[in-house]
Image (cartoon, rainbow, N blue to C red):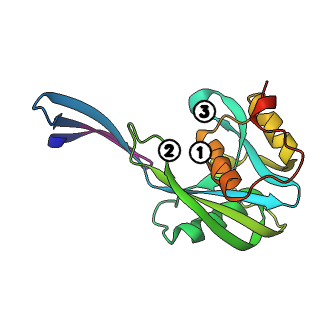
């Protein structure tokens, strides 16, 4: 595809929305709405029996849900994706990790957005006090066992697509050795 024109239709401090006119390989015209957002880091804070998750109210869907700690650099801040992962983990949970392993890079919604995210496994966790941003003041965090995480997914308490994709990367990298019955018991 070839972009023939582009125009910004909306911009705020967190995103830009543009409309691109394109020409397909067969010559037919088309249009794409593209949301530009900065990449973010998502952290899987692993303790011996499971993970730490955070819960907060997400305005666009009008509900609270559990997810893994995640976020992007604020205005004017920058650094590596690993530094961002450590920062988000500490900010949202107070936890500090002695080891951070990069599990992969994914895209949140590549059909309409440029935003990608790096997934990190954090281990060797030390507790501390969270230092949440104003928009995260209603956030809570707690430990979940692996079985509780599975149940939370099945019952709709975890609905965040990046969190589910990150958990898939983890489970592909680190096979389950507990009594997890696998997909046949998903009922």
Left or right of 107 in this view: 3: left
Spot occupied by residue 96 in the image (x, y as percentages of width and height): 76, 70
| Labels 2 & 1 near each other (Cβ < 8 A) | yes
| Gap between marks 2 and 1 measured at Cα | 6 Å
Left or right of 10 in this view: 3: left
Left or right of 152 in this view: 37: left
Q: Is residue 154 visible?
A: yes
**Front one among 97 and 148:** 148
Q: Which residue does the numbered mark 3 point to in the structure image?
A: 59
Name the dominant secondary structure of the magenta segment: strand
| Gap between marks 1 and 3 measured at Cα | 17 Å
| Labels 1 & 3 near each other (Cβ < 8 A) | no
Q: Point out the residue furthest to the top here.
A: 187
Spot occupied by residue 172 in the image (x, y as percentages of width and height): 66, 53
Indicate which disc, 1 or 3, sits on the residue closer to the N terminus.
3
Q: Point out the residue furthest to the left here.
A: 27
Q: Residue at x 56, y 31 (%)?
A: 60
Q: Residue at x 88, y 50 (%)?
A: 178
Q: Which mark is residue 108?
A: 2
Indicate which disc, 2 or 3, sits on the residue closer to the N terminus.
3
Q: Residue at x 77, y 49 (%)?
A: 53
Q: Which residue does the numbered mark 1 point to in the structure image?
A: 162
Q: Secondary structure at mark 3?
A: helix
Quadrant showing the N terminus: top left
Quarter residue 43 falls in? bottom right
Q: Is residue 138 visible?
A: no
Spot occupied by residue 174 in the image (x, y as percentages of width and height): 73, 58
Please report the bounds of the magenta region as a residue range.
8-19
């Amino acid at each position: 595809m070839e972009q023939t024109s582009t125009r910004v239709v909306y911009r705020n401090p967190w995103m830009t929305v543009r409309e691109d006119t394109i020409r397909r390989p067969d010559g037919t015209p088309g249009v794409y709405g593209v949301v530009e957002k900065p990449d973010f880091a998502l952290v899987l804070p692993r303790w011996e029996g499971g993970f730490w998750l955070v819960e907060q109210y997400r305005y666009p869907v009008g509900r609270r849900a559990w997810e893994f700690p995640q976020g992007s650099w604020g205005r004017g801040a920058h650094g590596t994706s690993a530094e961002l992962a450590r920062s988000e983990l500490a900010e949202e949970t107070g936890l500090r990790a002695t080891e951070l392993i990069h599990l992969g890079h994914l895209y949140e919604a590549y059909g309409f957005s440029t935003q990608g995210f790096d997934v990190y496994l954090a281990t060797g966790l030390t507790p501390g006090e969270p230092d949440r941003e104003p928009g995260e003041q209603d956030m809570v965090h707690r430990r979940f066992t692996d079985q509780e995480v599975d149940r939370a997914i099945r019952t709709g308490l975890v609905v965040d697509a990046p969190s589910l994709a990150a958990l898939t990367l983890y489970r592909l990298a680190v096979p389950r050795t507990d009594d997890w019955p696998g997909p046949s018991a998903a009922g």
